[in-house]
Amino acid sequence: MIHIRSFRRVAGVAVASVLLAGCAADTPQPARSGAAAQGAVPQAAPSATRPKQAERIPLAAPVTLAVSATYLERIMIPIGSELTLRAETVSGMPAITRIKTMSGPPYDISVSIPSGAEAYPMTVTATLNATIGHVLSGSVVLDAVPGGAVEIVMRTQAQ
């Protein structure tokens, strides 16, 4: 055991000295004065300006899209079925929300979406996977941020 502890100490000291040596190279050196400064070669003053960074384009704040999903067919979907809401922008980046149903339709669900004009047209799809095997789906295409809740009517999908 003594050998392992010794090795750990030596390894720890080696790592610490490497880290401190790297930090010391980055720290500014104090200016020399008196006789030591006379023999020194003059150096240019460091630049006060920072290097240019890539410009950041401000992103539009996300907004909450409220959806009311329903279906008009005469079927009963059991409680506990999964409803998935998918909002896909033109860039192909989807925002997805899933919930378990607690009652019958209409199902209220929401998802956070970008509000900028570059996100539109946006396709919003609601898919209901019933616990007994039925799959219902419906979608709408939005051209801008809607002023209120969006209604999606789902229909049974062929299996």
Image (cartoon, rainbow, N blue to C red):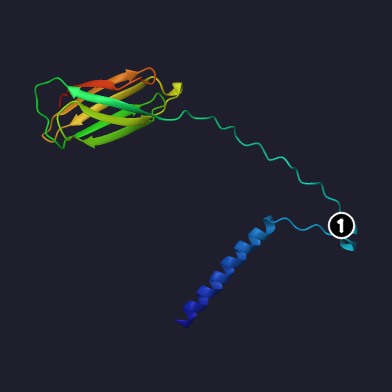
Q: Residue furthest front?
A: 148
Number of numbered labels in the structure image: 1
Quadrant including the N terminus = bottom left
Residue drawn where x is 30% and y is 22% of the image: 149
Q: Residue furthest bottom?
A: 2
Q: Position of residue 151 (x, y in %)?
A: 25, 20
Disc 1 crowd, CA 10 A, few/some/many (<14, 14-19, 20+): few
Image quadrant in which you'd find residue 71: top left
Considering only vertical position in the picture, is 13 above or below 83?
Answer: below
Q: Position of residue 11 (x, y in %)?
A: 54, 71
Image quadrant in which you'd find residue 10: bottom right
Between 117 and 11, the residue placed more toward the observer is: 117
Quadrant including the C terminus = top left
Q: Position of residue 4 (x, y in %)?
A: 47, 77
Q: Which residue position is annotated with label 1?
A: 40
Between 105 and 95, the residue placed more toward the observer is: 105
Q: Position of residue 104 (x, y in %)?
A: 14, 29
152 relative position to 49: left or right:
left
Q: Amino acid at mark 1?
A: Ala
Considering only vertical position in the picture, is 79 above or below 46?
Answer: above
Element type at mark 1:
loop
Residue drawn where x is 83% and y is 59% of the image: 32
